[in-house]
Image: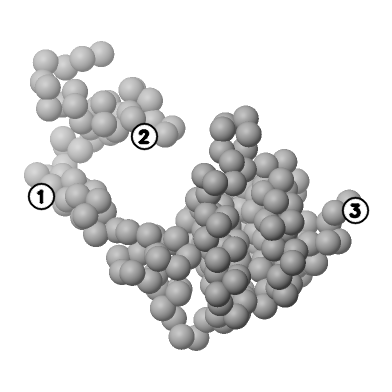
């Protein structure tokens, strides 16, 4: 359905380009926005302009940030020697919500998936290896999704870092196989981090 207004149709097209939002949903959202005050609509639009202009990625862990270092990396109370390796920013948010992890993060920006054409060079593996080489890191917690791709990424990183003097652990399997971290309840995720196990123990499972 097209309305005889280019600005209206453009707004629908932009919203429907987002994942999980079809044309009908986008149409309803735009109509909803039109029923709100002009100031509300402008604030809504300006929030995304600000997002594009001000939000960057942390130069250390690749979490989202408004500064060179994110709030986690710049926090002097966090454990610099403990790094939790995650797939994306949503996983950082999920783990932070548990209030159980006091270390820092490394956001890979994806996981190895040959079916989707994603290899080790397409995610932040080299940057993780560099951090292990240059920083005094004693433990890496592999907190990737318990999918075939997540497990393959875990194993690839383990092989790459095996020669280094760093302990590599993985979150406990309280999280079901195939589950995504962002959809795991906080209590289960928190316990899985606290009860992490050596990665070597998973290789025989």
Image quadrant in which the N terminus is located: top left
Instruction: Tell me the quarter of the picture where residue 2 sits.
Output: top left
Q: How crowded is mark 1: few (under 14 residues within 10 Å), some or many (20 or more)?
A: few
Instruction: Tell me the quarter of the picture where residue 63 sits.
Output: bottom left
Instruction: Give the residue at mark 1.
Output: 39
Residue 72 at x, y percent in the picture: 45, 73
CA distance for labels 2 and 1: 24 Å
Give the mark nearest the N terminus, 3 or 2.
2
Q: In this view, does 145 lie above or below 142?
A: above
Relative to 201, 37 lies left or right: left
Relative to 41, 1 lies left or right: right
Instruction: Give the residue at mark 2.
Output: 18
Residue 118 at x, y percent in the picture: 56, 38
Viewer-side residue, 119 vs 40: 119
Is residue 201 something that shows in the picture? yes
Instruction: Tell me the quarter of the picture where residue 81 sits.
Output: bottom right
- Residue at (74, 52) in percent of width and height: 155
Viewer-side residue, 84 vs 4: 84
Q: Is mark 1 on a helix, strand or loop?
A: helix
Give the mark nearest the N terminus, 1 or 3.
1
Residue 47 at x, y percent in the picture: 22, 52
Q: How crowded is mark 2: few (under 14 residues within 10 Å), some or many (20 or more)?
A: few
Viewer-side residue, 65 vs 47: 65
Instruction: Give the residue at mark 3.
Output: 204
CA distance for labels 3 and 2: 41 Å
Q: Is mark 3 on a helix, strand or loop?
A: loop
Front tag of 3 and 2: 3
């Amino acid at each position: 359905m097209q309305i005889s207004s280019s600005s209206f149709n453009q707004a629908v097209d932009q919203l429907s380009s987002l994942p999980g939002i079809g044309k009908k949903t986008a149409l309803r959202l735009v109509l909803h926005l039109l029923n709100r005050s002009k100031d509300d609509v402008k604030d809504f639009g300006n929030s995304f302009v600000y997002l594009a202009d001000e939000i960057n990625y942390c130069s250390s862990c690749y979490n989202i940030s408004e500064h060179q270092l994110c709030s986690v990396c710049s926090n002097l109370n966090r454990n610099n020697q403990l790094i939790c390796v995650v797939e994306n920013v949503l996983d950082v948010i999920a783990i932070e919500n548990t209030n159980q992890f006091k270390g820092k993060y490394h956001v890979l920006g994806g996981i190895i998936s040959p079916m989707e054409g994603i290899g080790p060079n397409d995610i932040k593996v080299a940057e993780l290896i560099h951090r292990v080489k240059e920083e005094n890191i004693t433990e890496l917690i592999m907190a990737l999704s318990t999918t075939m791709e997540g497990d393959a990424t875990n194993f690839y990183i383990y092989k790459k870092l095996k020669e280094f003097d760093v302990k590599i652990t993985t979150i406990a399997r309280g999280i079901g196989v195939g589950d995504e971290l962002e959809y795991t309840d906080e209590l289960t995720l928190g316990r899985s981090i606290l009860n992490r196990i050596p990665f070597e123990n998973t290789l025989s499972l």
